[in-house]
Amino acid sequence: MTTIERTQRWRTAFVFVLVTSAAGVYLERPALLLSSAVALAYAAYPLVTPTPTVDLALSRTVTEETPAHGESVTVTVTATNTGTRTLPDLRLVDGVPTYLTVTDGTPRHTAALRPGASTTFEYAVDAKSGTHRFEPATAVVYDVSGGTRIRTEVEAGRDPEAEMERERETETETRGERETESGTGATDRLDCAVAVETLPTRRQTRRQTGRTAVDASGTGIEFYQTRAHQPGDPSNRIDWRRFARTGELTTVEFRAERLRTVVLCVDARASARRRKRPGEPDAVAYSIAAATELLRALLVAGERVGVAVVGDEFEWLAPDRGGHHRAEASQLLRTHREGSSGREERPGSTPKSASQSQSQSESGSQSETHSERIQQLLVRSQGAADVLLLSPLLDDFGVTATERLEAHGHPVTVLSPDVTTTETLGGELARVERRNRVRSLRERRVPVCDWTPGDPVDWQRATKNRPGTTGQRSEVGEDLLGVAEGRQEAAEGQSSDERGWS
Amino acid sequence: MATTRSQRTTRPSYASSAIALLAAVCAAGLTTTHPVQRTLVAIEALGVFVVLLSAVGRQRGHRLGGLSLLLAGGGVVGLALGLSTVFPAGLVERGALVSGMLGPVVLLLGLYPVRETLTRHFTGVGIALLVGAIVIRGWLQGIGQLQLLAAVALTLLAWDLAEQAVTLGRDVGRGARTVIVSLTHTAGSLLVGLFGVAVAAGIYGVPPSTLPLAALALLLAGTLVLGLALYLGHLEQAQNPVERL
Amino acid sequence: MNRPSRTTVRRWTTLAGGVLVVAAVLVTGISRVEPRLLAPLRWPGDDVLLVAGFFTLTFTAGTLLLTLDGLVTDDEPTLPDPETTPAIPRAGSEFDRLVDGRVLSRRLGTDERERVRSRLRHTAVETVRRREGVPRERAADLVERGEWTDDTTAAAFLGQPARPRAVRLCDRVASGVAFRHEARRTAQEIVTYATENANEGEG
């Protein structure tokens, strides 16, 4: 959208005219009266300067289009004047993605561009997990006098020189499904993919009695693995993302039973929208990043995947397969993240965090509504579906929803991004509470992946003994004890099962 | 606190501020009659630029160096101002001198800035002080016609560049380089000033100190009517912002 | 056309101004060269005051015009702010805000206090249960008796033991401050308990 405005800057010249001519008359000094001619000249200045037409081409490149979490990425922006008039005063502000902060340099730039001239500037951002889209750059152009201002938005397009490069390259390119548009100069996003190393598997719920312990898949730890590509492997099993990143062709291989129909349920409520520290994405953004990756992985594995987003509004997409469905689901996740958080909040609006008590009571009653809705919709969709709940577990929603869903026969697996911090007392308390919830979920035999954003998503790690993580080891012990304490069913079977874990 | 405060500064940009201050001290210098006065203005100019440099230094991280520059520059400016108040001359002439020298200082206070919200106010007061000095000098008839005209032109130029410094600071902040854009804008405004001075000087050469009443009246009327016409032009332009796209 | 358009008005005005200036130049020129030609132009009074009076009127009118339109009515819309991320609260910030130590903090109602207390009690019970590996009833009992911690304030806040005298005193004077202090101490104790026992569990 382009707007043209007059700044009325030179109206001050009229004050000069009045003052000097008044002084000239009252003090009987014609010299002063004459000097008002200078001021008149300045007053006429904005009336005679031509208004520039803004025709800008913007190209944006990054040092790494698929960075790792925490990696610093340098963004280089080049603006070219493709019009026929000089732009004497151009001010550019690049559209840095919403959840990324600029760590070095500045995304703002000024230049005076003759027709055909271009200017370049760069800045650095720290990548975080998730897909981050660049927004259009804002350009403000003043005419020479400063009396007229034109404001417009410019999308990054393709660099004409890079276009020719790319055409030369496509002749030698292998044909295949490209998941990212890597057109040079047209970088519109940073893909910091969440690495998913293992997928959860189907579990029987407690209602199907007696088989919980014996069923080896009850732990929820069975993984798919990748191996080198061999000719003849089906092309829909090739891990294209890894190819895009590393250039190796690998095939995804599966063992044993997978989840058949999965609903990815993202906790996007206001009380879940918290972050570890300023400048980082919040738990909901991370959940959506993980959900996007899990969606892809599960669809590649051949599952039917649905999406439910629990937030201010309830969004639902029934489980299905296929490329079109995947695009729809990705779109749903993407718009939900950008739509509800996004640009309105940016200019420093006050956070609408309710007081603690209010949010607690709100979550209490609303979680009932939410899980009811989830359950109803699941019933509507064909057959029983497994639920993969993504929630930071900062309040009781995750636990309550899991209970309800499991009670109605939907096995739940949980992925919880950890956004708690030890920097404040409230953060530490939240961390303790979250740990408690993770434990209590695990006691109910719900597989929980305690995920630190930046690390790969791995359900198997939840029960592996990791050195250096003091919490984990005793938690495994607690797991055994907690299980032994309350569970009557097949205790021996369980302990033999747990031996099988490590 | 949960919010991330913006790290960029919205303070007036350095390049435009520097040019504005340069124009202001030149205007102040042009309203002087005595070589001693000119020296004082020159000393003040030095102090002003040292203070501006200290702002650059402090922003780039050299806290201690910036602070020492600030103190040094401030001291020099204070010295020049103090000396100007005791300059051996009549009250009115001294008033013109002090007013002319205060102008750039107040402008500096606005552009440093001492307080971001008061920038426009300080700028306005500084320019007004310069205009005051010009008017008093014009009344005292101590300086030549050309000097007077040039002083008016430079004062307007200073105002224009101060405005640009403020908008640039707001739009891109002090982190971005603004030298080219400032110079382009200065070139335009300078040309207009030259044109105005040339026309005014050309129209009349050196006017006699007293004009016949009729001529004075006609000139005055002409000025006002032209001013009105230009003002109407501004209003007309404001109503039709889209000439062509 | 009843009202002439602005452009025409402007153009005529410019023309008039130009004519006046030219006339002024002419008069001055004539006065220098041949003053006697201007004899008919003299009028009685010959007073600058007349001109001044005329001018004052115009000056007032001019300033009125200017102030009516406003000298600088530029809205100056701000450019977007890409360096910052949206203002999202930190995890646990609500608790921090509730129990911070500022003197003029918001007063907490009885309901809110009860909620804070029950939240902390629930967390303590769960943490004890997790760490000690005991059934929930036993854990609740431990918390009730205050045997989970050495700190008297925390023990008293969540259970039966008596509050330390200092806290009781403070409660009489400023109950809000006392409550916050107790809540903070309790939360701190819970956190310490949770992290300390993690180390013990290894050995």
Image: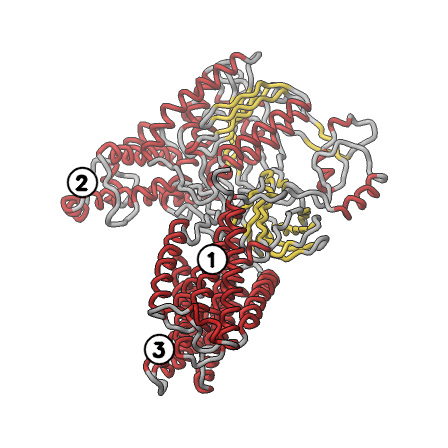
Which-is-in-front pick, marks 2 and 1? 1
- Taking depth in this image into account, of A157 and A241 the one nearest to the observer is A157
Q: Is residue A389 visible?
A: yes
Residue under the image location 35 percent in, 86 percent down: B89
The quarter of the rendered structure image containing the C terminus of chain B is top right
Q: Is residue B62 visible?
A: no
Locate residue C159, reporting x and y percent.
Answer: 24, 35
Q: What number is the disc on residue A195?
A: none
- Element type where label 1 sits in the image: helix
Q: Which residue is mark 3?
A: B95
Locate residue B118, reporting x and y percent.
Answer: 38, 59
> Is B4 on the left-hand or right-hand side of C166?
right
Q: Amino acid at mark 3?
A: Gly
Pointers 3 and 1 within a single chain: yes
Using the image, name the chain to which the residue with label 1 belongs.
Answer: B
Residue under the image location 19 percent in, 46 percent down: C167
Locate residue A417, reporting x and y percent.
Answer: 51, 36
C-alpha distance separating marks 2 and 1: 89 Å
Pointers 2 and 3 within a single chain: no
Q: Which residue is mark 2?
A: C162
C-alpha distance separating marks 2 and 3: 78 Å
Q: Is residue A44 above or below residue B37?
A: above
Q: Amino acid at mark 1?
A: Val
